Image: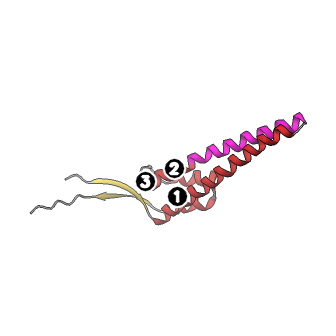
Amino acid sequence: MKQEKTKSPDSLCKAGCIVTIVIAAILIVTSITRGASAFAQAHLITSTYYSTVTMVLGILWFCFAAAQIASILLAVFVLNGKANNHIAAGVVSIILTGIIGGILILVGKYETKVITPVLNVE
């Protein structure tokens, strides 16, 4: 009979992960839209300086959208119980995605639970 140790978040931590995933998905869509809009606008501008600045802003919007993937992955790992701790997910969520989801993740508990299998001997 071997005991299994699993990590599971409580409901507050789960709520923070869900809020982080939803906000990060919204930020990805809006960042990609703004980046594409900046690239389209750069072709309409006749000045070289403003065209270059607009292209750089478009690249920065796409980089911001790519950075949101880390926040989503960490939140999913916490939800599945595969993360070592929840602090990294909370801090990354505060920095990249927003303060609400990150604080909910940090305030919630992410504890190790020991599961002992029950054998029916009849």
**Can see residue 66?**
yes
SS assignment at label 2: helix
Read off the residue under disc 3: 80
Magenta highlight range: 47-70
Q: Is residue 18 left or right of residue 8?
A: right
Residue type of the residue flagged with mark 2: Leu
Q: Is residue 37 left or right of residue 7?
A: right
The Cα–Cα distance between marks 3 and 2, rounded to whole angstroms, is 10 Å
Residue type of the residue flagged with mark 1: Cys
Q: Which secondary structure class fits the magenta region best?
A: helix
Tell me residue 3's x, y (percent).
25, 54
| Magenta-colored stretch includes residue 3 | no
Viewer-proximal residue, 65 or 83?
Answer: 65
Look at the image and tell me in which quarter the C terminus lies.
bottom left
> Could you tell me which residue is drawn at 75 percent across and 41 percent down?
58
Tell me residue 33's x, y (percent).
71, 48
Residue 17's tag is: 1
Read off the residue under disc 2: 74
Q: Is residue 53 left or right of residue 115?
A: right
The Cα–Cα distance between marks 1 and 2, rounded to whole angstroms, is 9 Å
Viewer-proximal residue, 87 or 43?
Answer: 43
